[in-house]
Image (cartoon, rainbow, N blue to C red):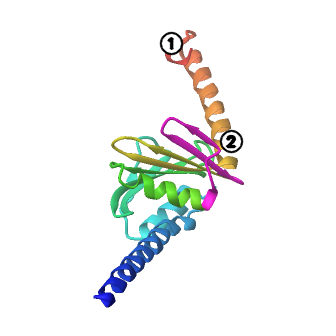
Amino acid sequence: MRKILITIPMVFIILFSFTCTKTKDELKQFQDFKWGSSMEEVRTIIVSREHEVIRGIHQNHMGYVDEILNEIVTIGFYFTPKTQKLYMIGFLWKTNVVGNQLLKLIEKKYGPPTITKDNMRKYKSGDHIILLELRSNETILGEYSSKYSTINKKEETENNKSNLREEVNKDGNCNEKFI
C-alpha cells in the first residue's frame, strides 16, 4: 500500500512535467518567425511544416490552423501595408480552456502584466509586446514587435492620406467615409 501511495504522486509529477515541456515545445515553434520577415518567408515556414496557408480578409494577412495546448487554434500573421513586413502574430482559440495555462506561461517568462484592464493583460519585454485577452468563450493572444508596429502605424497613416487624396481627386467632392 505504501508503494502505491508513493507511486501515484510520482506519476502526476511526471505527467505534469511532460505537459509543461510539451507546451513550451509547442510555443517554441514560433521562434522561427522573425519580426520584419516578408510574407514569402512566413509562407515558406508555414508550408515547410505541412500546414495549409489561409489567406486573410485583407492582403496583409495570412494564417493557418493548428493545435496548441490540446485545443484548435487559428494563427494569423499580420504584415505592414507598404513594406509587407511581419509585425504581429495573433492566436485565437474558440474556447477559454487555454487561458489560465497561457497566463501562467506568460507570467513565468515576462513577470506580472504592465497593464491590466478588464479581461486584457499587456506584457512588455524589450521590443516584444504580448496582449492576452481572456473572454468567456475564447482566448486571444497577440504578439507584437514595437518597432514593426510603429512602422505599420506610419504606413497605415500614409496609406489613408493617399486614399483620401485619390477619393477627393476623383470628382472634386469628399467621400463621407474619408471625413
**Tag 1 and tag 2, C-beta contact below 8 Å:** no
- Residue 32 found in image quarter: bottom right
Residue most extreme to the top = 173
Does the rendering let one see residue 35? no
Left or right of residue 21, residue 153 in this image: right
Image spot of residue 159 (x, y percent): 61, 32
Query: In the current view of this chain or complex, which residue is farthest to the bottom?
Result: 3
Q: Position of residue 22 (x, y in %)?
A: 43, 73
Quarter of the picture holding the C terminus: top right
Residue 137 position by quadrant? top left
Look at 64% across and 37% down and name the residue there.
153
Q: What stretch is highlighted in magenta?
A: 109-127
Crowding around mark 1 (Cα neighbors within 10 Å: few <14, some 14 to 19, many 20+) is few
Residue 150 is labelled as 2
Q: What residue type is labelled 1?
A: Glu
Q: Mark 1 points at which residue?
A: 176
| Amino acid carrying mark 2 in the image | Thr
**Camera-side residue: 171 or 69?**
69
